[in-house]
Structures are given as structure tokens and as C-alpha cells.
Image (spheres, rainbow, N blue to C red):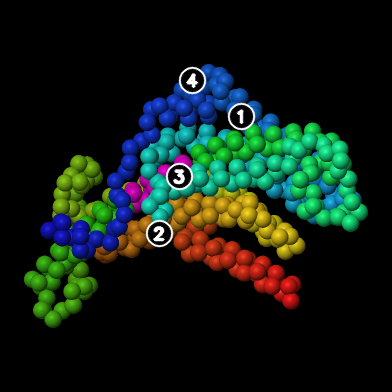
Amino acid sequence: MEEVYNEELSLIKGRTTIAKKIPGWLWTILASVLGISKNPDETQFLSTILYFLTFSSATISFVLNALFSAYDIISEHTRSDILDGAVSIMLTSFYCGLGVYSQRLAYRLLVNPKILDMLRLHSKKVIKLNSAFLVFVLLSSFVAIFNLSSINNTYRFNQNFKIPEHIKNDTDKFISINPCQVVELPIYICQTFWISQVVYSGFFLVWNLLIAVVLVSVARTQTILIRKFLKEVEKDANTLDKKMQEFQAQNSDTNEPRYFWFEENQIVDILDEEEDNDSLEEIEDEVSDRKEHVMTNQEIVTKYWTISMNVRLVSVKLQRWMSTIIGLVCAWTAIRLAHWISHTPTWYGVLMLLMPLVLIPLLTSSYAEVNYEGAKAVQSIFPTEGRIRMFRYLYGQNIQMTVYSHAITYGTIGTVVAGVLAAFTSKILLQEIGAL
């Protein structure tokens, strides 16, 4: 009977078993890198050195980029203005700040016992590929192409190069020349900037990848826990439904509808009587074994509240990081598209635009999956008169992963994708109009 129920009536799809926790050797590495120790007075040399390298390389990159932007604005050989310089400094500050913050956030995540307990060796699948692996591929590819695209910062001073009058203010002609030579800045400034950029981008990749892995793993754990709760309330509903059918067969006409709220609440009295006979201790010991178990209100609320609080904990811990990632990608995309209005796109420029855009749906899909499953929780509970007050509480306590109170769903992801496609279409139309 239970097999038929599971196959024919169950609407719970997807994995419902939780994977193993991270192995001890991996935790030892993470603890050493992040400076996590049982003894708070113990000095963590490795984590201190890594933090110093991350912070110093980010600071050097920011300062030298600001210095180059100032010379770029002043230079007569480039067409950059104050707005271009301000945008460059803004993006660099977000980029550098995010990496430093990500290292500290990774520490705070992994010292939290609840987060650590939910961290498992699993993640959402995207086209039969592990989403954490796809995030790694996208982030590492973006960092590699980003550094290669600015390789001209390492070029030596070209003694034979002079800026001809007819190509002034056309920076595309200077692609084989060190940018510092073009704006009349010492060459070692750009060379030092590129080295610090490469060093920092490596740390940026590691820290943000670690947080992304925690996100997709913990979100997957939450999804599985919600599905297990849905299975329990689905079995509960099936049990109550059978009891109502039995009551109808004994006390109603054959032509009476299957689902009917009976007069004098006789069925409610029967259900309430059975609920009162189940103590909390019996529920904890026998809930996994009893096939005809009717869940009490307290049992439902406790399980629901536990899931809701876990989801809220993860949302609060990650909302600043996620909002910064989304804001940085949106700003980067808008600037690249605006740049292409007056410049011809390059192959590496297109890749640097697309990779962060694909990264956002990958990360937010973890949020959307939890919210999709969580939205079904209240609707799956079988309604009885004794549960009306409980429903009032549950409807005000949604199971949602949010970013500053904004729930991310598959609908919002689709809206973002549509907006990006519209931006590309606008770029093509403007280019075609300009060619007329």
C-alpha cells in the first residue's frame, strides 16, 4: 500500500537523502587556512599570512589603479574622463573589498556549528553537472582571462614608440604598448599593479569559491530537509484522507462528495481525540515506524519552525555577500555594454561579460530551489478545524531564503535573464542603426 502511495500519489520529486559530512582531512585543511582552532589563544600563522597577503595585494591593486586612473584622465593621449576614472575606481574598490570580506565571512561560516552541520558533500545538479564544479570553472576561467586581457601591463618601455598625431585619443591603437607609457607614468607602476592583481585574483578565487561551495551545499541540505518534511505531511494527509473516507462511508449517503465538511464536526472530534493520545515522546520514538501516524499540531509546528530558522540563519549569513556579488556583476555588465557602444567587442571581452552573468543564475538557483520547495510546505498540510490556528502562524513564517528580505525565485532569475537579452538586443539595434 505504501509503495503504491509513494509512486502514484506523491508529488515530492528529487533527492531526499542527506550526503555525508566533509571528511576530517578536508576540515583540517580548511581550519588551518582560515585559522579555526579549539584554543582561541593559539596563534594561527598560516591564516595570518594568507590574510596579510590578501589584504596587502588588494590594497596595492586599489591604490595603483587609482593612481593610473588619475593619470589616464589627465593624459592628452587617451579619451578617458572623470566619469571613466570614477567608474574604474568604484569597480576596483568593490572587487578588492569583496575578496577581503569573503575571507572573513568564510571563517564566520565555518565556526558556526549549525552551518557546519549542514555542510555536506552534495550540491544541486545543472545539466547533470555538479553546480559547485561549474562555479569553480566559471570563476577560475574569468580570473584567468581577466589577467591575460591586461597582460600589456607587463610590457617594458618601448624606446622606439612615439604617439603619432593622427592616432591620438584612440587607445585601441596602443594595445601592444604598456598603458603606463601611453599616459606618461613610470612603467614599474603598471607592472607592479599587474603582479598584485594576479596575486589578489588568486585569493579572490579561493575565498569566494569556498563561500559559493558552502552556499550550494547548505542550500541543498535545506532542500532535502524540506522534502523530508513534505513526505511526512503527505503521509499524514493520506492517513487523514482515508479516515475521512471511512467516516463518509459509514455516516453519509453514497452520492455525497468525497471531501465535505461534516455537520457537528464529528470527524474533527475523532481526529482531535487521536491527536491528544499521542505524547511528544511517542512522536519522537515512533514517527519513523508508524504507517498510520497522524501528526500533532506541536509536531508540525516544531519541524516547520526548525527548518524555517535554519533557512533564515543561512540567509542572514550570506545576504551581504550575495548582494555584493549581484551588484558587482550588474555594474560590470552595464559598463561593458556601454563600452561596446563606441568600441568593437573582442572575444575575451565577450567571455568576461558572459561568465559572471552565468555565475549569477547558478548561485541564485540554490536560493530558488529552497524557496520553491518551501512554498509547498503549508499547502501540503491536511486542513482540520483543530489546525486553523496553526495555519495562521505558518502563513506568517514562510520558509524562504532571502537577500535583505527579497525572496529569490525562478521567476526573478528569468526576469534577469530576459533583461540581459534585452540589453544585447539593444546593443545590436544601436549598432545596426549606426551603420545606416
Q: Nearer the viewer, mark 1 or mark 3?
A: 3
Foreground residue among 292 and 391: 292
Residue 389 placement (x, y as % from top left): 34, 60
Label disc, if present, on residue 236 of the rendered structure: none
Residue under circle 4?
A: 39
Residue under circle 1?
A: 51
- Amino acid at dot 1: Tyr
Q: CA distance from mark 3 to mark 2?
A: 23 Å
Foreground residue among 262 and 218: 218
Residue under circle 3?
A: 133
Q: CA distance from mark 4 to mark 3?
A: 33 Å
Lower position in the chain sequence, tag 1 or tag 3:
1
For the image, the number of numbered tags is 4
Residue under circle 2?
A: 372
Lower position in the chain sequence, tag 4 or tag 3:
4
Lower position in the chain sequence, tag 3 or tag 2:
3
CB under 8 Å between discs 1 and 3 = no
